[in-house]
Amino acid sequence: MLKISTSPHLQTPRDTRSLMRDVVIALLPAALAAVAFFGIEALTVILTSVAACVMFEYLVCRYWFKIPNTTGDYSAVITGLLLAYNLPSSMPCWMILIGAFVAIVITKMCFGGLGCNIFNPALAGRVFLFISFPVQMTNWPLPHWGSLFAPDGRTGATTLRMLKTFGKVSDGAQQMYTLDDLPNLFDMFIGNTGGCIGEISALALLLGGGWLIFRKVITWHIPVVYISTVVALVGILYVFTGNERFLPLPHLLSGGLLLGAIFMATDYTTSPMTIKGQLIFAVGCGVLTVVIRAFSAYPEGVSFAILIMNALVPLIDRYAVQRFYGEKK
Amino acid sequence: MIYALLTNVGILGGVALISAVVLYLVSQKFKVEPDVLADDIAQLLPQANCGGCGFAGCADFARACAKADEEEFSGLLCPVGGNAVMSKIAVRKGFNFGGGARKVAVLRCQGDCAAAPSKVSYDAVSSCRIAGQISIGSSGCPQGCLHLGDCVKMCKFGALSFDKATMLPVVNTKLCTACGACVKACPRALFELRPLSPKGALVYTACRNIQKGAIARKNCRNACIGCAKCFRLNPKVVVENNLSTIPPEVDADACGAELRDTCPTGAIVYKEKADA
Amino acid sequence: MLKKYTFPMGGIHVNKYKLTSASAIIEAGLPEFVTIPVKQHIGAPSKIIVAKGDKVKVGTLLADFDGVVSSDVHSSVSGEIIKMETTPNAAGYEETMITIKVEGDDWEKSIDRSTAIVREINLSPQEIVQKIRESGIVGMGGAGFPTPIKTSVPEGKKAEILIVNGIECEPFLTADDRLMVEKAEQIIVGARLLNRALGIQNAIIAIDENKPAAIAELQRLSKLYVGVNVRVCQTKYPQGGEKQLIRAITGREVPSGKLPIDTGCVVQNVGTVNAVYEAVLKNKPLFERVVTVSGNACANPSNYLVRVGTPVSYLIDKTLSDVAGLDKIILGGPMMGTPITNINAPVTKLTSGVLLLSGAQFCKQPSTSCIRCAQCARVCPAGLRPYVIKDAMLYDGGIDELRRLHAAECIECGCCAYTCPAHLPLLDYCKLAKQELRKK
């Protein structure tokens, strides 16, 4: 029997599943780096988070929405990976479960599932955990390259925490750091520093970003503009104040900037649709990140910056529209 | 301490006072004279805002009722509330209300899977409007149902459902309010609003095919072939363009069953108790 | 390295599937019956001037243009008119057609059947337009706009450039490609005829880069003629769209709500230009055209010279293909073509291809939810935002919202629906939106 359908009669082989699979592939180098530096603990965090996210999405589809299971599109896997990458390796499993619940059930499925959420699920989960369990969320085990198990329970401060306290008088409980305490730039680049498990290795993240751009999953606009805005603003602060806590390179290589700029600010659903809108969004993220890093009590502001800009996306989408053919210039 | 307290009270009080003055001035400037009659009528309406009356929602219809004189009023009908509501409005307006028969929607097609088998399969977005543009439809009847349910999506009262076995929409006469949404939704104008007879019966030709009998029958077993047998039985029946149309004047109670039995293709549908 | 012209906004790269670019045009021969629709163009249906039982020859006028926007229709075969009633068209709907029983192949005496190329142009512009009108020529790229109207420039407007559209950006189709290779000189002379009719000296033949044979042939011949130049364009869909081609070649944009002539451009398909040559210098009305019969389920894909009115089923039999296992038969290209409901429907002046397709890649995939990737907006050559138009149609955004989104500018190229990773039927929503706007 002949089929009758509307044109076009061809469709791209690049469906949602294949795009999302490319994102998962792009996230793998960072997972390798995490396991290499934090050993079996990092692997536990990643597996728990991914399993929990997929499970929650499956349960919601099956028992609440009563729709065919949507976990096959890999989006829950991505949320799980990103949530894990935003946690320290010492995170207890039950807390990860809570984070996954907030990310998948509350931030994503309550809003209608894939494509309908306003906020990035992984970031919302992370911020929920960060506010609920500040002690566990700021406990940074030191990296131990080459050994699967942590040799002891040693922890240290992240680079950004060190930068935050530059030039401040120690208040007894808090240690005061100087430039000499910072890990060297090469260690920061490959990931041999303390921090969230997925954000430490700039090299792995850049590899992933390159893959995404090569496979045309994302365009360069958001990551490049976001990162350049942060580097430029920190650089300006450094030039004008002369304060070493505003050195641009440590700000670029440490903290969640690369992870956020490449993987989380570029999330389709929660970023603007037009290139013009994406530029506004990226600059906004950059400015907010620097404001939080420089002037707030928190050493790191990437998650908050992206979440705040997520809320502005509908507004940006309304006004940053592209020119149509034949429009008067 | 007391000074700080008083300052706060003063500032807040001042803000409240200024706001009150502004609010008063604005409300004076943009004052809307309430239309008591229209508001009362709106209270009587079902507030479904279906637009079945032809006005933009119940409030608009209420304003039209309030303005109407007796003659204009007789032309207005809230299809959802029906005579019950209209008579209440008439009382409020002080008019006499004659009333009319309750109308329901009927589907003028019986091209189900068995009677009008598919010759092609449709593989695109589920919309009769789009399907009708690219193809005559699976059965080959240019006037037949396209089986994609635009009407069901538009019905706000749950009176239409899609029968998976026949692939045709089914009207639940009890729930139908004759709002006319399905009449507008169907790209092939297959729905018609018909008055129920005093005993609640319906008789109509469930076909709109105007092709010659042989061609129509080739595509659909239940098609009207324009043989005019029904016309010979009851001269009020109109047969033109190879299609019989039974006007509402035909008494369904008196000759509905006969009309149905005389049709050789079963195109005439008679429901004795459509409401039951 | 040649400069390659293209349009900057949107567009996609699709798999070309050009199976028949090397197969020469074959005469399809004569079927037993032809059914010739009296409306093969945009505008009013033509007025029938023959009667049932009349004997006609190849090229006899069957229906005269009726009204301002209309076109003549000629017989494509010789024989007897046996039916003048409604006959189902490709979509299955009834349409007025003239059915002729084929008897022999007897051509009207006035038609010059020699293959010698006439190069002299001694006619005035008015005479050329008159000949085009009498030959029933319409835009053969698919739109079917009557050519005589396009060649008479309205008062107050001025034509500057004639663009001959040799871009066949639809996958599978090679009819224009073969025509350019085999009838290159005819096309160039045809372009000069149109130049003369428009009162200009500048004709540009635009070809996309995946047709090297046509480019070489036309470049060689165009050197011999003044005022005819070849431009090579990038292979990109929809490069052959009128508005996109004007932007690519001249850098001008047709302003919203205006016509191409407002930019000084007249765009004509190569098939049309060839028909103009044959009509004006050979007295041959438009009654046959090149049709690509192809598709992944076609046994012997080829390019045929087909008489208008030939049933599609005759062409399919000609390629010895089996219809039984097919998923779809498409008239035109896979991006913008229409599906066939009635396999006995006739080939018209606008049929550029018949595609026999089967397999999942040519069927609609089930759609999932929109992930807001905005790919549809990025590939839209009209610069629209199909995802917003979709939402406006689904959630009843109202006519003002559709106007604000400029839905009327959609050229229905299908880039959005092709690209959508969620396989949403975006083009269908855009078409519905356009209809909403037209209703008001």
Image (spheres, coloured by chain):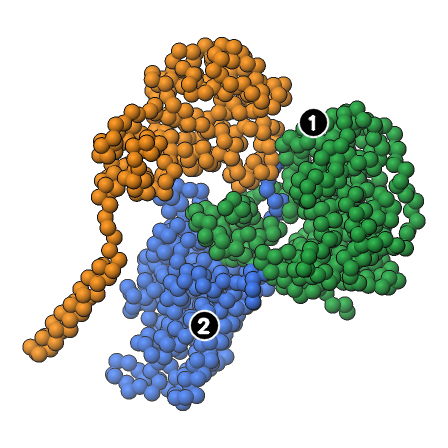
Q: Which chain is green?
A: C
User: Where's residue C76, x and y in %?
Assistant: 81, 36
For mark 1, what is the residue?
Answer: C85
Residue B46 is drawn in which quadrant?
top left
Chain where mark 1 sits: C
User: Where's residue A271, x and y in %?
Assistant: 45, 62
* Residue B69 visible in the current orientation: yes
Q: Is residue C340 above or below residue C69?
A: above
- What amino acid is labelled 1 in the image? Glu
Q: Secondary structure at mark 1?
A: loop
Query: What is the display colour for chain A?
Result: blue
The residue mark sitting in front, 2 or 1, is: 1
User: Residue drawn at (28%, 64%), measured in percent from left and top?
Assistant: A132
Chain where mark 2 sits: A
Q: Nearer the viewer, residue B91 or C266?
A: B91
Question: Where is the N terminus of chain A found, in terms of image quarters?
Answer: top right
User: Residue drawn at (77%, 34%), measured in percent from left and top?
Assistant: C62
